């Protein structure tokens, strides 16, 4: 593959990875199978770049934060993953790839984007001012100075030619000014796409007519149902019905009808409806009065009844006994309280109550006098 295609595949493989669904190894193998990568070297490059971006994610985040803060008007957010790939290649894999191979990867992209990136990352002031302090929070200070910063400054003389070439391309932006081994950036052409017109609904097919099919296992209707003189079944049924009817009538004729109480008349008089109504009502009232009349009991010796009442035993339950005991205790407590109060104060409340009664009598007399006046 060409350098531009390799970078695009690295970006796509990194952005499509989801750690919640699969592992990184399984994802890379599935992606290489999807793009049908026949070259073993290209597959190894994609795998190592994706692994490196995940491993050095914090390192790349510091670099890209500083890049977008310093060159916010010159870079786009859409190229975030592009700069992340080149951050890994520049900081970690520059000496492994070699400057000639790195030159091909840089010139394969847009000249203005790469010029901003190269002038930013290969600047000693940027490295020491913007990123060294943040890198030291993640890695050891000796590793930052000896490996990260020293590696970039060590390759700065060889990379200066690439920066000058990018400066020329970014300033001229001429399509014909492309050296051998460099790719020309082609703009996509407009493709004609037909209108998305709504299609008409297909014609509804009428439902098929149900064709009745006779059951081959169904028995035919017997002819005796239509011909009374066939096998004599209908005649036998009619004879049995008549016989059952005659037996039922004979049984009910011999049985005795029930006698109801409402059909009986009183034994004393035979009264027709509407006649002797007043006499019957008076008789009913007299009967009711005799039944409800109170007869005063005749007591010969009341002393005997009172004595029996006095001798009657009253049985108290547990609740009544407890109530009586509680009442007795309460009275004893009140008396003990009065005695104790009298002993401590050498007086009781009798004088106060006497004075209170006199004052109330005086007020009452005064009120009555004022009313009489």
Image (cartoon, rainbow, N blue to C red):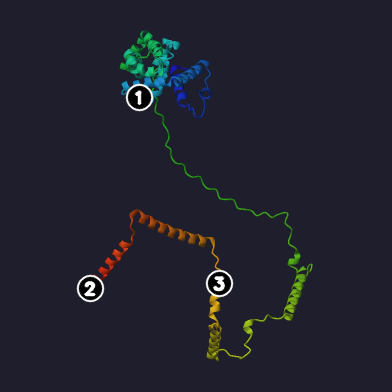
Give the labeled residue for mark 2: 369
Q: Is residue 53 left or right of residue 220?
A: left
User: Within 10 angstroms of label 2, few (less than 14), some, or many (20 or more) residues?
Assistant: few
Give the labeled residue for mark 3: 311
Front residue of 341 and 157 = 341
Q: Is residue 324 left or right of residue 366?
A: right
Front residue of 225 and 143 = 143
Please state the horizontal and vertical placement of residue 247, each as a whole percent of the image. 75, 76
Residue at mark 3 to residue at mark 1: CA–CA distance = 117 Å
The mark lying in front, picked from 1 and 2, is 2
Please state the horizontal and vertical placement of residue 339, each as a whole percent of the image. 38, 57
Q: Are marks 3 and 1 in contact (CB under 8 Å)?
A: no
The numbered mark, 3 or 1, whose residue comes first in the sequence reads: 1
The numbered mark, 1 or 2, whose residue comes first in the sequence reads: 1
Residue plotted at (42% across, 19% down): 85
Using the rendered view, name the quadrant where residue 63 is placed.
top left
Please state the horizontal and vertical placement of residue 284, each as a whole percent of the image. 55, 86
Which of the numbered marks, if any, corresponds to residue 76?
A: 1
With respect to residue 34, does 333 lie above or below?
Answer: below
With respect to residue 39, does 326 lie above or below?
Answer: below
Q: Are marks 1 and 2 in contact (CB under 8 Å)?
A: no
Please state the horizontal and vertical placement of residue 356, each as a whole percent of the image. 29, 64
Label 2 sits on a secondary structure element that is helix
Label 1 sits on a secondary structure element that is loop
With respect to residue 195, does 205 lie above or below?
Answer: below
The mark lying in front, picked from 2 and 3, is 3
Q: Is residue 372 left or right of residue 52?
A: left
Residue plotted at (62% across, 53% down): 210
């Amino acid at each position: 593959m060409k350098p531009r295609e390799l970078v695009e595949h690295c970006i796509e493989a990194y952005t499509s990875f989801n750690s919640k669904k699969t592992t990184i190894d399984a994802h890379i193998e599935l992606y290489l199978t999807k793009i049908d990568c026949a070259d073993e070297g290209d597959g190894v490059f994609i795998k190592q770049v994706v692994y490196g971006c995940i491993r050095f994610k914090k390192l790349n985040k510091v670099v890209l934060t500083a890049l977008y803060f310093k060159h916010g008007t010159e870079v786009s957010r859409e190229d975030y993953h592009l700069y992340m790939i080149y951050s890994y290649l520049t900081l970690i894999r520059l000496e492994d790839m070699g400057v000639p191979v790195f030159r091909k990867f840089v010139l394969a992209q847009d000249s203005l984007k790469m010029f901003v990136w190269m002038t930013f990352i290969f600047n000693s002031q940027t490295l020491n001012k913007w990123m060294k302090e943040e890198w030291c929070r993640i890695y050891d200070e000796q590793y930052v100075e000896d490996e990260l910063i020293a590696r970039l400054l060590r390759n700065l003389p060889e990379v200066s030619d690439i920066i000058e070439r990018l400066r020329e391309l970014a300033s001229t932006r001429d399509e014909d000014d492309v050296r051998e081994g460099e790719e020309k950036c082609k703009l996509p052409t407009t493709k004609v796409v037909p209108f998305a017109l709504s299609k008409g609904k297909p014609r509804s097919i009428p439902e098929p007519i149900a064709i009745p099919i006779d059951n081959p296992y169904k028995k035919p209707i017997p002819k005796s149902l239509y011909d009374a003189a066939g096998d004599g079944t209908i005649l036998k049924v009619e004879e049995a019905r008549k016989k059952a009817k005659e037996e039922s009538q004979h049984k009910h004729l011999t049985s005795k009808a029930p006698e109801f109480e409402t059909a009986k008349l009183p034994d004393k008089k035979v009264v027709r409806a509407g006649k002797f109504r007043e006499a019957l009502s008076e008789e009913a009232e007299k009967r009711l009065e005799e039944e409800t009349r109170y007869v005063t009991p005749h007591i010969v010796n009341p002393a005997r009844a009172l004595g029996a009442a006095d001798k009657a035993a009253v049985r108290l339950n547990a609740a009544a006994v407890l109530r009586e005991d509680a009442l007795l205790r309460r009275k004893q407590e009140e008396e003990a309280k009065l005695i104790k109060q009298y002993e401590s104060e050498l007086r009781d409340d009798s004088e106060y109550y006497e004075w209170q009664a006199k004052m109330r009598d005086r007020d009452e007399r005064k009120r009555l006098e004022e009313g009489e006046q």
